[in-house]
Image (cartoon, grey):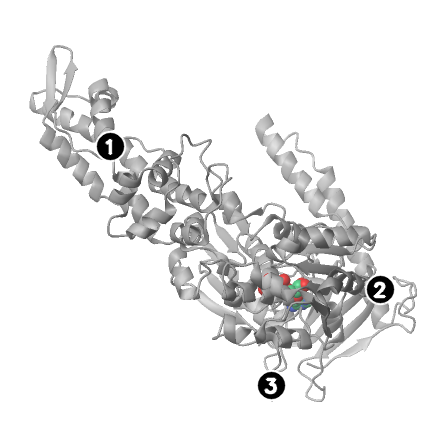
Amino acid sequence: MSTTLHQPSEPSGPSGPSGPSGPSEPLGREHAHLAASRAALRAMRADAEALDIKDVAANWVNAEVLKAQIGDRIAALADLADTPLFFGRLDFLHPPGAEHAEGAEGVQFYIGRRHVHDGDGDPMVIDWRAPVSQPFYRASRREPMDVALRRRFGYTGGELTAYEDEHLTDPAEEETTSRLLQSEIERPRVGPMRDIVATIQPEQDEIVRAGIGGTVCVQGAPGTGKTAVGLHRVAYLLYAHRERLARTGTLVVGPNRSFLHYIEQVLPALGELQVKQATVDDLVAHVPVRGTDTAQAARIKGDARMAQVLRRAVRSGITMPSEPVVVVRGSRRWRVPAYEVEELVCELMERDMRYGAAAEALPQRIAHAVLVRMEAAGEAPDDRVQDAVARSRPVKDAAKAAWPPVDPAKLVLRLLSDGEFLASCADGVLTEEEQKEILWDRPARGVKSAPWSAADAVLIDEANDLVRRTPSLGHVVLDEAQDLSPMQYRAVGRRCTTGSATILGDLAQGTTPWATGSWTEALAHLGKPEARVEELTRGFRVPREVIAYASRLLPSIAPGLAPATSVRESAGDMQVRGVAAEALTAAVIEACHESLEREGSIGLITADARVPVVAEALAAAGLPYLSPGEETSAGARLTLVPASLAKGLEYDYVVLDEPAAVVDGEPDARTGLRRLYVALTRAVSGLIVVHAAPLPLELEPPVR
Ligand SMILES: Nc1ncnc2c1ncn2[C@@H]1O[C@H](COP(=O)(O)OP(=O)(O)OP(=O)(O)O)[C@@H](O)[C@H]1O
């Protein structure tokens, strides 16, 4: 890449159409285009506001729908002062699609967050997701994609203040790193997660623009942009398949509320307001969750074998009839013998259909058998007669006795309360010890009062789906996917059976006892075994020294994975401070004070068990702090982060309190070290590790 950064002599001075550069200077011309684009956007908005729907809407319902759509469009056309209308420009050698046309002149496009056109309908700014914009992200000197010039724009406080050019077809130009890209990557992180639309990298763009038909799974080290890529992929898919996805819906699944809160503004900033966000627990919230499981019980309940246990449980009530069905119509009695009803039941059992659908089909099948008899006797019954027979008491009762209705929550309650029932459903699938482990100590009395755990809710969701098909969405993004149990993968997978998914995760950051060991396995549970797996290794968050320190853990926590590289220029401030036990909290407070002297956000990460002590110390020191996911601002920059909630988040400076306590907070050493790896990889600029207990051996430098 070859770039020169052009800035006015006083970068902080005022600029605009008549700013520091005159209108004939390149920057001046760009200012003029920005001003004209803004005016065009205002005109587009005025047009939308002036739309009169009185004569076009046939009725008031249509009118309301149309009004809402126009309202959305007006909102989407707002010119946000601090969001640059365009961030790039492409000068093509030929008009797109006419590369080889003789005499075709070059053409210029401005690339921005949304499409803007002038009064004649000619584009002023092209949406970053349009095919024409793709070379902005992908073109290189090796493959210029017909781009003569790629220009990136730099903004300061919403003002266009700089630009940077690459002449991709000029052999004389040298390859250097983009300063604007670098400064975007290096900028301090205050506030919620932001979009990366101006600086998406080629390897990320490949994933963002992958077709809607296929599922993509991304393995990526901390800070390689997995979350960013997943969110931009949704925005891209919504652009490319708007109508289809408006009908079927899109969903982003994240690990917890704080994380969802942290990312919730990215899609709206890209103009996408309709994407649902949820945790896996939200998806399966069929019952109130009040109980917890032992790690062992949770692991068994999350095992895919439970699907088989549940399938048996759902069907356990099916009973072969011993009596005939007798229907009386008028003066006649019609009799379907028990063996024939049994045949109907067996036929339904063999069909691959939901339990509930079969329950609805059985009365119709019995009624059909009655109708066959009527016809044989010379009657000519029609469909209405069949319906009436299906709804008649004897048929309904017989169907219900043979194929009883199943309430999924009650069924799971019985499985976890009744040892004999569990044994009959789990025979040959779960060992006796496993069965004992998942049984409740005391049978639960009712669905409302049962001590449901998060894993139980997933079981209910599975049972629910066995009874009635879960509707599928058009596209699901699953972030931090490594942490899901097989049963949770199945729960997410059934929400995209007819759609596609983007699965994002890092095997080294798996911190649940059931975290997946391989993506092949996870994808099989999701029902997407054909998904393609991509790997991202260039890290945009964690500085070199910090990632090198954290990567010492990799051989123990995920032996097959390569450490991330860091694209950040500064090596980062990395300090490890050993102190006496009684001085620990004071040293942590001191490290927070020091970090607060720097620019940007500060995350104080501590073992969950130490949160109360640390919180008290912060209060005593007069240091106000936020909770994870709460928005940091210039006035409130310190967040106290329990290690269990650190995943997916990032802070300019991280103070990590007592690593040994973070490790000890987990049920086993490998999970503990993985939790520590997550905590160590949240820093953007600097990390101070403060410890009194010995550090885990894996973190000690090798003795020479
Ligand atoms: N192309 C890019 N340009 C600028 N910033 C980027 C780019 N890609 C990622 N980033 C930034 O790097 C940081 C890390 O990205 P992100 O949180 O998506 O990584 P991740 O792989 O999901 O990390 P983790 O595994 O820790 O959850 C974010 O601040 C993101 O905005």
Q: Is label 3 or label 1 in front?
A: 3
Q: Earlier in the sequence, mark 1 or mark 2?
A: 1
- What residue is pinned by disc 3? 703
In the foreground, 175 or 218: 218
Residue 26 visible: yes
| Location of residue 316 in the rendering, given as x and y in whole percent from the top left corner | 25, 38
Residue 413 as seen in the image, left or right of residue 683:
left
Residue type beneath disc 3: Val
The residue at 51%/76% (across/down) is: 555
As rendered, which of 622 and 214 lies closer to the eye? 622
Q: Residue furthest top?
A: 331
Residue marked by disc 2: 597
Which labelled disc corresponds to residue 508? none
Residue 403 numbered tag: 1
Helix, strand or loop status at disc 2: loop
Task: Tell me the quarter of the picture where residue 525 sits.
Answer: bottom left
- Residue 84 spot, x, y in % from top left: 76, 59
Q: In which quarter of the image is ligand 1?
A: bottom right
**Number of other residues with Cα within 10 Å of mark 1, as a class: few under 14, some 14 to 19, many 20 or more:** many
Looking at this view, is 587 or 128 the one in front?
587
Whether pointer 3 and pointer 2 mark residues with C-beta atoms closer than 8 Å, the reply is no
Is residue 191 at least partly visible in the picture?
Answer: no
Separation of disc 3 and disc 1 at Cα?
69 Å
| Element type where label 1 sits in the image | loop
- Whether 48 is drawn above or below 648: the answer is above
Side of 476 where 5 appears, left or right: right
Q: Residues within 10 Å of mark 3 (few under 14, many from 20)?
A: few
Q: Do the residues labelled 3 and 1 touch (CB within 8 Å)?
A: no
At label 1, the amino acid type is Trp
Judged left or right of residue 621, residue 9 is right
Choose the circle earlier in sequence order: 3 or 1. 1
Residue at x 33% of width, y 40% of height: 415
